[in-house]
Amino acid sequence: MSNFFPLKVIELENTTKDSVVVSFDVSQDLYETFDYKPGQYLTLRFNVKGEEVRRSYSLCSSPMLEEPLRIGVKRVKDGLVSNHINDQLKVGDTVNVMPPDGRFFVDIAKENYKTYYLFAAGSGITPILSILKSVLYTEEHSFVHMLFGNRNEESIMFKEELKKLQKAYPDRLLLKHTLSRPKSEWSDLWTSKKEKRHRKGRVDAACVKWFINEFPPYAQNAEYYICGPGTMIENTKKALQENDVPDNRIFTESFGTATTDDGSKGFDNARLVASLDGEIVKATIPEGKTLLRTLIEAGKEPPYSCEGGVCATCICKLKKGKVHMKNNLALDDKEVSQGYILSCQSVPLTPEVEIAYE
Amino acid sequence: MNMDKQQNWMHELPVAAYTSKEWFDMEMKHIFSKTWQFAGLVEDVPNPGDFISVQAGLNNIFIVKGRDHRLRAFHNMCRHRGTQLLRAVGKGKKAITCPYHDWTYDLEGKLISLPKQEEEFPELKKPLHECGLNLHEASVDIFKGMLFVHPDKDAPSIMDFFGSVVPYLGPHIVEELVEFQEKEGEPFYAKEINANWKIIVENYIDHYHLAHLHEGTLNMYDHAKAEFGWEGSHYWFYEPLVPDYLADVKNAAPYPLIDSVPMEKIGAYVPWLFPNIGITEGESTWSTFHAIPLTPDRTLVVIRTKVMNLSEWEFTKQYTKSAMSKVWQHYGNRGKYEGDASDPMASGDFMAEDVYACEQQQKSLQSPMFSVGAQAQRGEFAVAQFQRVVKEWIEKGKAHE
Ligand SMILES: Cc1cc2nc3c(=O)[nH]c(=O)nc-3n(C[C@H](O)[C@H](O)[C@H](O)COP(=O)(O)OP(=O)(O)OC[C@H]3O[C@@H](n4cnc5c(N)ncnc54)[C@H](O)[C@@H]3O)c2cc1C
Ligand code: FES
Ligand code: FES
Ligand SMILES: [Fe+2]
């Protein structure tokens, strides 16, 4: 079902103190399987401290360029996998990886004439960088207006690569940095002539509004891509909506958030009936466990990848009972009202829960 | 039979294409309502809430800017009983209300309110914007500082249409220039000409006439060194300045030189973008030449001209230098015929010469004796090619009917 392929790590590079860029080798016979669109992610499987865990990482390489598959992993405080990757991974290691997936991507076409607004903060740069490179390299008529937020000048991932892109595409790439806690008065090394220094502050409503007012689109088919931590996505999206940007032009990717336990407690030892791969599975849901974890612990192989309520790989339909989703960043209201749930985020609220994977 | 054909034909099109209502209607439908149509200059819609409306073939379309500074285009037609919503230009709109019964739309074209909804339209139960009564969307884009609209909301990208001709356009950075207006809000030139729109296009792209009709007015350009051709449906043209003019161009140019054009690229770039917008990209001016068909034998020509963004003083200085330059003792000031300046052929004004020639040609199309006698193989190559392009669009349109 979930198909993992062993990929070899061929390069590790620290672009900042607390992040690492991992390059994978893809053998000829897997080229097609690992073909991707800029913006998509890989799901990696590890065994850390005796538990099988999966995490998704956006590809920061571009499928349009001759470069290996590459991800950028930033340490999360006390994070299991991000620290494992930063501390333990070595060149030559093999990692089990699922083929690229994800709904956050750009359909690149040479003849496109678009203005891409890219909003990134922190490690949210990864899918944005892939989009950025692919557009500049392939769509010779399109423009990119990018706003990149970071804590300070030292925490900026891909600083050098971005600098090079600015030099190579001065007429089509407009890049502005904003730093929430700049360490020093910054030199003008890498903002354009007109604007001497970076902006101070976060990627918030005021900043987004300033940005779209200051840099109107030239090509009128404008699209807006957002990726970043915490409330950055929500804030940016809201600011865009308040400035008349229609929803169908806004695309977002969330990496998940610090779990927000809103106190609603699940029903202890509820019964689970799940139809999965043509089989009816019955199990008891241990206290605090999600439907997905219950199935995994019962030795089954339900589909999943991010386990963070983001990717919707674990989607299933609720046939009976009620659940609480701890985090839902993947399903819209319509899907929820049709009874779809994310099994990786669902805890039971009724003594019996029946679900079906389709 | 053969004779017959020759007598009623231009190079590639029947004479009826230049005189009949039937052809005019076909062109409106299959060409002007299916292509990207010139709608003005980017600065015409400067701020959020500003709008303009334009006739584009059979469609009246308005362009409005959102607070995101992106332009949107809609058919300027109320979804109730069709009333035209917006007048020519305006500012600061937050919503669009139809004058007739006050149906109101937001800047995304969504119907947001209508009077007496519950009493009069009980069948409209869903939220108004889901009732299938939103404004019809159109497309708008910017190409080289110009606005273009297309009646189809999923129109092919404007670069699909114009992209191939881009390498042949002048290096002018149009956005840096400002419009030259003698009277605020009025174009440099606007005139109704008594000729079919294609006669005017054919005159614009006719290399053969330059050295003859304009022998005394456009001789500062080196017609013998002209280069021209077609890309897609579009014509491109370039010719350098004559050596005498080039040598003294800094003084002789009538307006300050456009600084985005490097010296080695200076000249006249005069493309025709299908179907009805020409650009004249020169050493000191940059102009759009919009030929708007009114009837089979009447066309409105509107020329808008842009120049360097400099003070009046700089223009005065240049004017003085130009007036003193010896170049104009030999070039560009003389009519073809001697006579009173009110005679177009003696005016020394190349536009007047062109208008005159176009109107004289149109008159003869009525004659039973009319025929195109022969075609200059290089100098009139473009004229025949343009007619083929027109024919292709009409045939393609009819095939899809
Ligand atoms: C589609 C997708 C693409 C992603 N792309 C990237 C990428 O390109 N680069 C990258 O570094 N990460 C990316 N992530 C995030 C990544 O998958 C992991 O969630 C992250 O590395 C943390 O995992 P962990 O095992 O280290 O932390 P965990 O052990 O799972 O969590 C430790 C603590 O951190 C919190 N936490 C977990 N994730 C986050 C988060 N994103 N922000 C804030 N707090 C968090 C948890 O709630 C917990 O309290 C992506 C996630 C998704 C869903
Ligand atoms: S596994 Fe990604 S949302 Fe559940
Ligand atoms: S026609 Fe517009 S409101 Fe009636
Ligand atoms: Fe002429």
Image (cartoon, rainbow, N blue to C red):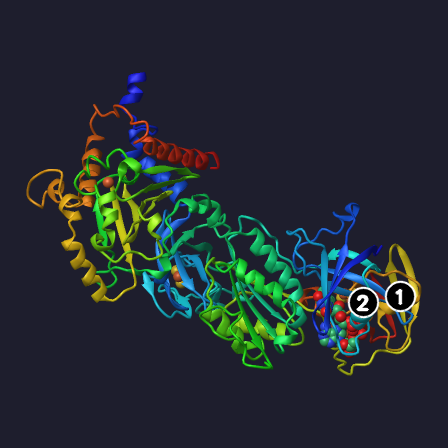
Tag 1, which secondary structure?
helix
The amino acid marked with disc number 1 is: Leu
Position of residue A56 relative to residue B8, above or below, is below
- Viewer-proximal residue among B386 and B23: B386
Residue B216 % position (x, y):
16, 40
Quarter holding residue B130 = bottom right
- Viewer-proximal residue among A118 and A87: A87
Query: Residue under circle 1?
Result: A295
Pointer 2: residues within 10 angstroms few (<14), some, or many (20+)?
A: many
Q: Which mark is residue A343?
A: 2
Residue B106 % position (x, y):
46, 67
Quarter holding residue B377 = top left
For image coordinates 67% across by 51% down, the residue present is: A66
The amino acid marked with disc number 2 is: Ser
Marks 1 and 2, Cα distance to the nearest angstrom? 10 Å
Q: Residue furthest bottom?
A: A263
